Every structure is written in C-alpha cells, then in structure tokens.
Amino acid sequence: MTRILPLLTGAAVLSAALLSTGAQARTLKEIKASGTIKIGTNAEFKPFTYFEGKTMKGFEYDLGNAIAKQMGVKAEWINQPFDGLLIGLNQNRFDLVISSHGITPERAKAVDFSLPHYCSGGLIVSRPGGPKTAAELKGKTVATQVGTTYVDQIKKVTGEKNLRVYPNNANALQALMSGRVDAMVNEKFYGLEALKLNGKKLQQGEMMFQEKLAMAVAKGNSTLLSAVNQNLKTVQANGTYAKISKSYFGQDVRCK
Ligand code: ARG
C-alpha cells in the first residue's frame, strides 16, 4: 500500500483534478437558495477537523461554520480522504474545501484559494534520540500523509527512498510510535497534539518550512470565493476568529 501511494501524489493527482469536467460549480446565489453550503474536509486532523465520537469538531470546523453563518446558510460537512479533496471540489461534490491546504502554485492551477485562514508549517517529530533537524533527517526514514505538501519537503531532504507515505495521519503517527520510521513531518499543531498525548515517548524537532493555509473553491467560482474572503475578514475583525483560534491553540494563528 505505502509503496503504491507515491504514484498517486503530486502531479498525477493534480492533472486528474485539472482534467475533471463535472457539472458547473454552484454559485453563491444557488448555495444561498439551497440554504446549505457543502464543505469537504479530512476529519482525522486534530485540532483542525476531527471526530469526537460522532461529532465533528476543530478549529476549521468552527471557522467554517462561522463563515457559513455569515453567509446565512447551514454547513453540511463531508469527510473524505485528504488526497481526493481538490478533485472532489472540481467534481462538485462540495462547494468549499477546508482542510489545511497549503497554497502552492501547482494546486492553484486546479482550484482557487481563499485568503489564507492561518499560517503555520511542517514540524519534525521523532522518538527520543531520533532526528530533530532537517539536516539530521538525511538517511532516515520519514513518515507523512499522502498528497500533502510535506511529501515534497521530505523528499528534498531524504530522497524518495526514505519517504513513507500513509493514507492517514494516524497511520503515520503509528509508524513513528512503533519504530517503523525514524521521524514524522506534519502540520505543527497536529505534531504538538501528538506530543501532548504521548508524553515522553516522542520529542519535538524543528520546523522544516512555513506555509499559508487556505480554503479552496472550484476554479472560477468567483461569487463564492469573494463571499468566503469577505466573511473570513468579517469574523477576523469581529473577534469570532480570535475566540475560536484561542480555544484550540491558545493563540491567534492568523497570518501576520
Ligand atoms: N498542510 C498540508 C498540505 O497542504 C497538509 C494538510 C493535511 N490536511 C488534512 N486535513 N489532513 O498538504
């Protein structure tokens, strides 16, 4: 499984997304008329979107709901694997994707990104005694989730041979915990959460790179994009964003 997955990442996924010619994406007017905005996410990414029992929670879940509320619609959340989200968007399976996508030139060819809804980056996590810096990752095996920006960052340092991609973050973390890989690179706050839950079994390494994370709409869905941007600015100005952010991270994570 983990051997085959790299073939489905990067360019292949993106060209598939570009090629998909589904029905027209729903305009803001159509979304408002239906009363519901469909939001796609990969909800195994605590503290961004995740399940507690049957209830979805998280920073992006609360933020998405706040933006939907500003729009005067309900949010219907659709949970699916991370690497299919942008494709699903262009197939109109949802109107909006909120799943911590880093803005990259490649992705921006396939979808339209909102203003960034937070700034963060990739963090190295390992077991005590393991690699803590990008330089120390050389020659070590490193786990991450398929289809993420971390894949390319890791490859640059360790080469394809030492990269281990997993369908879910939980699998990547498990691989690290059980000693099947030497380190994991993942979103900073996901890594910090793993550190919190696993006490002395894991150690925090350095940040490998920074990125701007944004929501995505189907290419050319300009009415929805401007409403999302406008409403993000509103919740950032009226205190809603700061309140949500502090409740999950203890700090305001907006881009400065
Ligand atoms: N920030 C990374 C990227 O843009 C990882 C996002 C993973 N998100 C998730 N919901 N699992 O690729």
Image (cartoon, helix red, strand yellow):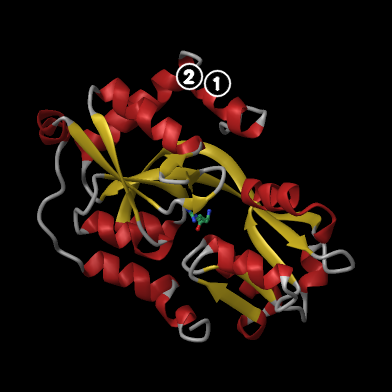
Disc 2 residue type (three-letter):
Thr
Q: Picture quarter containing residue 228?
A: top left
| Residue at position x 44%, y 71% in the image | 10
Of 63 and 103, the residue lying toward us: 63
Left or right: residue 117 compared with residue 221: right
In the image, residue 198 above or below residue 182: above
**Image point (48%, 79%), residue name:** 6
| Mark carried by residue 183 | none
* Above or below, comparing residue 169 to residue 67 in the picture: below
For the residue pair 99 and 62, the one nearer the viewer reads as 62
Q: Secondary structure at mark 1?
A: helix
Residue at the spot 30% in from the left edge and 23% down from the top edge:
69
| Residue behind mark 2 | 240
Instruction: Give the residue pinned by disc 1.
Output: 243
Mark 2 sits near ligand 1, with its Cβ under 8 Å away: no
- Of all residues, the one furthest to the top in this rendering is 238
Classify residue 113 as left or right of residue 137. left
Asked whether 221 or 79 is in front, the reply is 79
Crowding at mark 1 (Cα within 10 Å: few <14, some 14-19, many 20+) = some
How many numbered markers are drawn?
2
Ligand 1 within 8 A of label 1's CB?
no
Q: Position of residue 218 (x, y in %)?
A: 25, 50
Q: Secondary structure at mark 2?
A: helix
Residue 202 in sight in this render: yes
* x, y percent for residue 79: 35, 53
Q: Quadrant of residue 162?
A: bottom right
Circles 2 and 1 in contact, beta carbons < 8 Å = yes
Q: CA distance from mark 2 to mark 1?
A: 5 Å
